[in-house]
């Protein structure tokens, strides 16, 4: 009999309990043993639940119970999750988590502790919700050098961008709709500004490149500056705009990591991943392009990913998930100023006469007397910022600027 | 030092050798040991290759060498692959194969032998080329009841259907183009008639439902009857036509399995998977819809999948891949006559006056004096065949008939 504990009974934690009870026979068959949820840690009371007797408010009940060999962490946030998880791993309890902040900030340390303790630290649910991505990236694509990863990793922003187009509304209106439907939080800044997606690309990049990529090293540009006009110009240019989190291996051996809005031509499968769906595109040197699409959040999809880790950890206690990376500095990540793209630009002015001398070799999408939308030639963020100054001198305002995903 | 053998030096086998040498350092790091290809079995000579000394024409060299712990089978076809693989497994050598025919026909037996011998039988490359699908289905979605699988599993037919639309050519012309590009074989029947895709859905369905689904139990309808007109009507109706291999869990607990052309509305991500790309859509009771897209064939993508299995088998000799199913009869598969769909129909006649009394509640896509394209109400294949007789009595010819993927 395997006994486990769940820490946190919010959306994901309650989903894990639900999937556990609903698919119990299936899970038991795969684990090849009986399994039981012995504790659920939450500060709140849930007296009406059929499993209300399992709740505890005291973490030490879990930590000090030798019967518990595996702990599921679905509390979210860095603390107290970090302290609890670290203690569990040090006490030789395996941990399965859905907490992207924890993995993005402390992954290297926690993986090292798990290895020393000869237990597991698994986090399939931390990126892409129910989409299998951690295991495919670390195992199925193991015979590849990962050249590039591009992901739609935040459902809230994808919903907002999709809805702006569908309903012809501006950003603020789409955000309010998302909030009223529960797709965006009351304080939506972590989603809107790209921090959530940045944490997730950190996890994928750490797996792909074997070194810890910390969120503070990732340049993040949110979607709050995107206007409906930008989305309409994108359509005119044959594509859509998505918040994309990217990691790319450069010829120098260093990597470029960023989260920012991107114009994506319709020929790229990511361009049509809409609503709250997430997607991850991986380019390997042997496999070529592989794309994974699915529900990036939500109670049951995320719980499904958590339970796949739980089953794996219980069914194969001696199994090595080939999931690890080293702690590291940031000198293998190039500064964002030197990342180079073609850029979509929307410019406003009453006089565009000097435009073509400042921005050379651009492709115009549309031009009116007071507005121009164009796609620039390949240029770096630092050159782009110089161009913006020159445009300002010429009384041309950069109303919008974001990269093109090639 | 791990020593392996490759049986078959065709497209995939030579790709495995290429990936092995190209990504050697990466592979060694993941295997945590030195690894070497000791033998390559092929009846042909390759004197100019840098590794020409590794070739043998004698299978017994491999079978009787106790240093060989793992054999890669990339010969294809049922024999002699089946005999060789069985002997390897009985001699406690793990086997990694890309051979879908072998797995679809003999999977249950070979998995059982591997289990008895305490070695591995892995086949990630047998379905979807480089797309990670076997492991995600068996492991990442382990906490789900699989409600449905729909796959574009044959690149040749997908290329032909895509090209018919792009170039406005008929089936025969697109087939000849595919042959001249090497995308279709000189005898293309296994692809065109859906047999190749059927073998692959057998493998996925066997994993999903735990019982061996044999190719002879799968109803297969090819794409050779699809005309350019059908693809144009599909476009008019807001979708595309793809050869789809499907397995579906029914309320009765039985499953429906078939390979047939299907009209797919644009809202389904499969509708825009073009050219030689493959894709698999899986619906789980918890995860919801997940879609995997990538190169379904080709030397390096397939070799990438083979090598991921090789790395796994070498890195974790004691690891249980949770990959097995039981041999079984076919009474859990419903007869194809009772499978029910809405159907796309293209009808020709000089007199459609009796049409609406024979086919009720249809949605017309287009109608001319001599041709009607419509989508029928939900009906079974056996009812469809009755309707076809009634239409024949009314001098209306069914020029084309295939299902709608909902």
Image: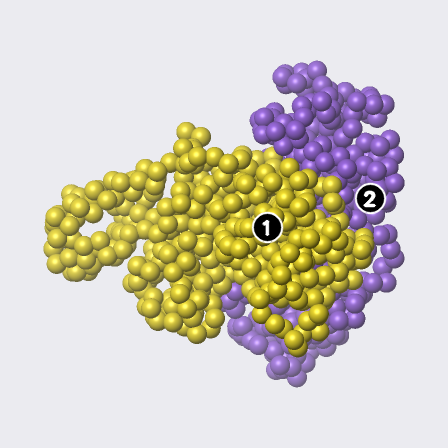
Chain colours: A purple, B yellow
The spot of residue B176 in percent (x, y) is: 38, 71
**Above/below status of B379 relative to A165:** above
Q: Can you say which quadrant of the picture contains the N terminus of chain B?
A: bottom right
Q: Place residue B27 in its image quadrant.
A: bottom right
**Residue A111 badge:** 2
Nearer-the-camera pick, A238 or B264: B264
Where is mark 1, residue-wise? B85
Q: Is residue B308 visible?
A: no
- Secondary-structure class at tag 1: helix
Q: Residue furthest bottom?
A: A357
Tell me: A321 left or right of A262.
Answer: right
The residue sitting at 75% across, 71% down in the picture is A251
The residues tagged by marks 1 and 2 sit, at their Cα atoms, a distance apart of 38 Å
Q: Chain of mark 2?
A: A
The spot of residue B152 in percent (x, y) is: 47, 54
**Above/below status of A307 relative to B128:** above
């Amino acid at each position: 009999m395997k006994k486990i504990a769940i820490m946190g009974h919010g959306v994901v934690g309650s989903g894990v309990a639900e999937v556990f009870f609903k698919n119990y026979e299936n899970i038991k068959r795969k684990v090849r043993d009986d399994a039981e949820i012995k504790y659920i840690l939450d500060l709140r009371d849930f007296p009406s639940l059929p499993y209300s007797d399992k709740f505890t408010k005291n973490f030490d009940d879990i930590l000090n119970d030798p019967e518990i060999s595996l702990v599921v962490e679905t509390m979210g946030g860095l603390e107290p999750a970090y302290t609890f998880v670290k203690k569990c791993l040090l006490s030789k309890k395996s941990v399965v988590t859905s907490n992207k902040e924890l993995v993005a900030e402390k992954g290297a340390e926690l993986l090292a502790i798990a290895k020393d303790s000869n237990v597991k630290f698994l986090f399939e649910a931390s990126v892409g919700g129910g989409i299998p991505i951690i295991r495919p990236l670390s195992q199925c694509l193991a015979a590849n050098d990962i050249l590039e990863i591009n992901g739609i990793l935040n459902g809230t922003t994808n919903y907002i961008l999709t809805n702006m187009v569908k309903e012809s509304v501006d950003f603020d209106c789409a955000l309010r709709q998302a909030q009223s439907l529960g797709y965006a939080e009351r304080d939506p800044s972590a989603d809107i500004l790209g921090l959530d997606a940045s944490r997730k690309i950190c996890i994928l990049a750490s797996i792909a490149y074997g070194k810890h990529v910390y969120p503070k090293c990732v340049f993040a540009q949110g979607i709050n500056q995107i206007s409906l006009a930008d989305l309409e110009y994108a359509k005119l240019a044959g594509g859509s705009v998505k918040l994309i989190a990217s990691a790319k291996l450069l010829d120098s051996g260093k990597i470029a990591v960023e989260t920012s809005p991107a114009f994506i031509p319709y020929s790229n499968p990511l361009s049509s991943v809409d609503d709250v769906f997430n997607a991850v595109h991986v380019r390997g040197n042997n496999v070529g392009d592989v794309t994974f699409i699915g529900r990036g959040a939500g109670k049951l999809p995320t719980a499904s990913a958590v339970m796949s880790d739980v089953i794996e950890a219980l069914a194969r206690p001696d199994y090595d998930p080939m999931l690890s990376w080293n702690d590291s500095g940031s000198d293998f990540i190039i500064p964002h100023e030197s990342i180079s793209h073609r850029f979509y630009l929307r410019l406003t002015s009453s006089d565009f006469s000097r435009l073509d001398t400042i921005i050379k070799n651009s492709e115009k999408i549309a031009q009116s007397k007071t507005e121009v939308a164009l796609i620039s030639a390949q240029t770096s963020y630092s050159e782009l910022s110089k161009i913006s100054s020159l445009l300002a001198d010429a009384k041309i305002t950069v109303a919008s600027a974001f990269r093109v995903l090639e």
